[in-house]
Amino acid sequence: MDKLKNNLFVPGVALVVLLLLGGGYLLIFVPKGELDANSSKLTSAEKKLSRLLKSQVLPTKEYVRKITTAQVEMEETFEEAVSVFSRRCDAFHLFFEDETQVPAVSVFYAQYETAIQNPTTGLRAKYWEKFPSPAVEGEEEDLEKKTPTVEMVKDTEISGPEGQAKMGQAMKQYWISEAVFAACHQLGIGGLQSIEFPVEKERTSRRGSKKEEVEVPKSKASYDKVGASVLVHMEYSKLKDLLAVLYKNPRVPFLEPKSVEFGKIEDSVKDFSKYIRQQTFQSRALADAAEKAGEPAAQEPLVKVRLELVALNWKGVERSEDDSENIEDEDE
């Protein structure tokens, strides 16, 4: 019996060990494998969620609050910009004597023609008075062709169904002409030759193809530009000052010139070559004294300058009906 017990003891111990090892495998290695698999799934899900969050914004309360605040600030900035443009451009829309109402055709054209062509009070007459040109013996002076010339809208162009729009255009062209004359008076520029108003062809631009749907903005700024081509013979050193004076004009909202072109004037260069262009003084005080004494000095030669000026014709903001309703709702 004792021998039988001894023979069964070893297999029993081995069985217990096997059971313990099996239980340990079931308790440790199987859950660990499942845990590793779930961990991989969790990592994959986390990566997908991260990509989703980067590509899309979830409408959380904080996000909605930030977006709403940003929209309000953008609307306030937009309204402030509109107000600035309106204040700067209001005077450009006025008629003579700062009238807002469109006058009758006959009244307007009489004022318009007088303001430019009157032989004593017109823009050209005042310019000739300040910068008289030498008369040529034996030739009768043709005031119509005498420089500076100003392109004018004809009276026949402002009659008819489009007369009011043409009057507004002619009025703005006059304000530009007045600004150019005033700048030349201020800077002593006596070589103004002509002011013309080229009319650009209407341009249209389309974005996308017919198949594509283009989202139209709710609010759209409405404006165009008034161009003027100015030819003037002047000292190059005064060009910067001329543009500065034009930009400061309280009535005409000038933008950056479309172009500035230069050319030489043969007669001006020929006369300049006769001057003695160099003289040495021991000090600045002596040079200033010589200048005050009226000693001959070389004059800066004139150059031919063509300015393609541009003025902003601001018309305001066009809003859609939906946008107007949204603004009213916000005000309430």
Image (cartoon, grey):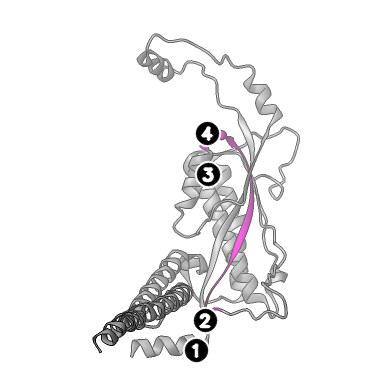
Mark 1 near mark 2, Cβ–Cβ under 8 Å?
yes
Q: Residues within 10 Å of mark 4 (few under 14, many from 20)?
A: few
Q: Pointer 1: what residue?
A: 322
What is the x, y in percent for residue 163?
Answer: 66, 75
Gap in angstroms between the C-alphas marked 4 and 2: 47 Å
What is the x, y in percent for residue 112?
Answer: 59, 63
Q: Name the residue nearer the viewer: 268 or 7.
A: 7
Q: Could you tell which of marks 1 and 4 lies nearer the N-terminus?
A: 4
Q: Could you tell which of marks 1 and 2 lies nearer the N-terminus?
A: 2
Q: Secondary structure at mark 1?
A: helix
Q: Secondary structure at mark 3?
A: helix
Gap in angstroms between the C-alphas marked 1 and 3: 49 Å
Residue type beneath disc 4: Ser
Q: Pointer 4: what residue?
A: 237
Q: Magenta span covers which residues? A: 217-238
Q: Pointer 2: what residue?
A: 218
122 left or right, relative to 198: left
What is the x, y in percent for residue 266?
Answer: 71, 28
Q: Residues within 10 Å of mark 3 (few under 14, many from 20)?
A: many
Q: Pointer 3: what residue?
A: 184
Gap in angstroms between the C-alphas marked 3 and 4: 14 Å
116 versus 55 height, above or below = above
